[in-house]
Amino acid sequence: MRMILLGPPGAGKGSQAQNLSVALCVPHVSTGDIFRANIKEGTALGIRVKGILTAGELVPDDLAVRIVADRLSKADCANGFILDGFPRTIPQAEQLDAMLARDGKAIDVVLNLVCPDEVIISRISGRRLCCCGRTYHLTGNPPKVAGICDFDGKTLYVREDDKEETVRTRLETYHRQTEPLIAYYAQKDALCDVDGEGAIADITVSILGTLEKMGL
Ligand code: AP5
Ligand code: MG
Ligand code: ZN
């Protein structure tokens, strides 16, 4: 199962990828998570991309492609993966296709999470994260105890690029650079629109039903 989750910031790519990764037994590969982990650890990559993420802009294509090529070459991706946040531009998509084609592989399905801008603003402003990678929302997906991760009891935090002004920049970046991928994958007959509104678990069930109907 080689899957891409496409959609604007806050559409629920990470939340769905987390559930689908468990249900389908394939790894969740999030370029945003990889960049944030490098920023946190202060690696050379982290130092290079920190300002770009804080501004809500895109990391250069060659760098994003290199990170993904490296990740997809790991043994756990041999039977599939769920890409979240990659590709984000047409050149990234073309390089991903070329990378897979070299191994005689291709993307099976691109799930496009459809979510209006006003829902996105409310989702992102209510997002809370744990260092273990789990994502919560103040009202949509609250932890059992406010501000505390259900899983490990650690204190939740707000992502640095979730400030309202940066969210607006991220949305503009999405519409300008990433939205053209919808037409790119539609043309390849790989695109499947998913209603991104509704409860997180219901959306996962509906995606799994769609995949089954597609014979995947
Ligand atoms: P990235 O980390 O990919 O961020 P993003 O695309 O902006 O998406 P988000 O992670 O904000 O949202 P999401 O769709 O995962 O939603 P989530 O499930 O968390 O990228 C960050 C940055 O890294 C980029 O800006 C760029 O600088 C750089 N970057 C990354 N990849 C790159 C690439 N390929 N090329 C260049 N640069 C790159 O949900 C959001 C909130 O809503 C949560 O609180 C969640 O609990 C809640 N929620 C989710 N679904 C529902 C629901 N159905 N109902 C109620 N609440 C919900
Ligand atoms: Mg995410
Ligand atoms: Zn946690």
Image: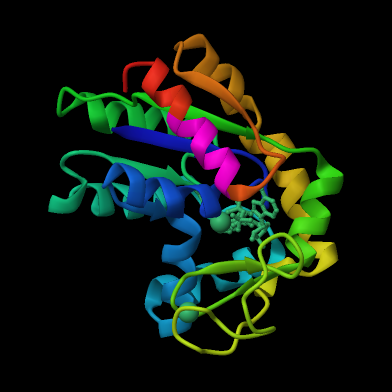
Q: Main secondary structure of the magenta part?
A: helix
Q: Is residue 184 above or below residue 130?
A: above
Looking at the image, residue 155 lies above or below residue 201: below
Locate residue 23, reporting x and y percent: 34, 45
Query: 18 or 44: nearer the eye?
Result: 18
Left or right of 138: which side holds 94? left
Q: Quadrant of the N terminus?
A: top left
Q: Is residue 206 inside the magenta stretch?
A: yes
Residue 132 x/y as whole percent: 44, 77
Q: Residue at x 79, y 70 (%)?
A: 163
Q: Residue at x 51, y 20 (%)?
A: 191
Q: Residue at x 25, y 53 (%)?
A: 70
24 with respect to 83 (left or right)? left
In the rendered image, residue 85, in percent from the top left (x then y), is placed at 51, 47
Instruction: Estimate the x, y position of residue 165 in percent, counting from the top left.
Output: 84, 64
Quadrant of the rendered image containing residue 3: top left
Residues in magenta, as a range: 201-208
